[in-house]
Image: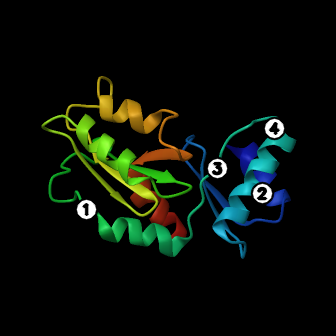
């Protein structure tokens, strides 16, 4: 991830740090999240030739995601507890459809521009996960497990 850090630092973003080899980045910027995401997308395309959608959240928005934690009472395994970060809120019919895809053991809650989903049996065969990871949401999305979400918040707080 050194190349990514150098690219974003060179674009004027401050305190650029990456989380593992995951493509998750924490930066200091005065830009609004949507502007920052668009600038990151431009940098990735121009600097690395990668056409990748970027979702950005402020430190306070990320803290609110963690504070909400609507499935904290049932999500026992943080690696199977996913938060999908969206560029826009989902339509109500899409949220209803997601709920219908959840198995008896799975849980899903949509709040604002995030969808929290717990897959205790894993995501490999989950129809819910397939839909969350697919193109049919009507929104750009990227998902992170709970461990990653809380680690990114800790990085933002440093």
Q: Which residue occupies 71% across, 63% down? A: 36
Which residue is label 3 attached to? 54
Quarter-of-image position of residue 73: bottom left
Contact? badges 3 and 2 (CB < 8 Å)? no
Task: Measuring from the top left, give residue 82's x and y in whole percent.
Answer: 35, 46
Quarter-of-image position of residue 58: bottom right
SS for callout 4: helix
Q: Residue furthest top?
A: 125
Q: Which residue occupies 48% across, 53% down? A: 85
**Residue 127 has which mark?**
none
Which residue is label 4 attached to? 48
SS for callout 2: helix
Residue at mark 3 to residue at mark 2: CA–CA distance: 9 Å
Q: Nearer the viewer, mark 1 or mark 4?
A: 1
Task: Measuring from the top left, give residue 130's x and y in whole percent.
Answer: 39, 30
Quarter-of-image position of residue 123: top left
Task: Measuring from the top left, give residue 70's x and y in whole percent.
Answer: 25, 62
Mark earlier in primary sequence (2, 1) = 2
**Residue 70 has which mark?**
1
Contact? badges 4 and 3 (CB < 8 Å)? no
Contact? badges 2 and 4 (CB < 8 Å)? no
SS for callout 1: loop
Residue at mark 1 to residue at mark 3: CA–CA distance: 24 Å
Classed neighbour count for the residue bearing mark 3: other residues with Cα under 10 Å, few (<14), some (14–19), many (≥20): many
Q: Which residue occupies 49% across, 75% down? A: 60
Most foreground residue, 7 or 126: 126
Quadrant including the N terminus: top right
Q: Nearer the viewer, mark 4 or mark 3?
A: 3
Residue at mark 2 to residue at mark 4: CA–CA distance: 13 Å
Which residue is label 2 attached to? 39
Mark earlier in primary sequence (1, 4) = 4
Contact? badges 2 and 1 (CB < 8 Å)? no
């Amino acid at each position: 991830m050194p190349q990514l850090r150098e690219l974003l630092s060179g674009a004027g973003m401050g305190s650029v740090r990456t989380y593992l080899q995951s493509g998750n980045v924490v930066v200091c910027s005065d830009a609004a999240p949507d502007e920052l995401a668009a600038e990151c997308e431009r940098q990735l395309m121009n600097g690395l030739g990668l056409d990748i959608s970027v979702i950005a959240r402020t430190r306070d928005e990320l803290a609110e995601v963690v504070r909400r934690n609507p499935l904290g009472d049932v999500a026992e395994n943080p690696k199977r507890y996913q938060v999908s970060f969206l560029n826009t809120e989902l339509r109500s019919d899409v949220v209803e459809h997601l709920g219908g895809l959840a198995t008896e053991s799975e849980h899903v809650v949509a709040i604002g521009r995030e969808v929290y989903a717990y897959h205790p049996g894993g995501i490999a065969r989950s129809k819910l996960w397939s839909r969350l990871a697919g193109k049919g949401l009507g929104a750009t999305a990227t998902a992170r497990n709970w461990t990653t979400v809380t680690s990114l918040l800790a990085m933002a707080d440093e």
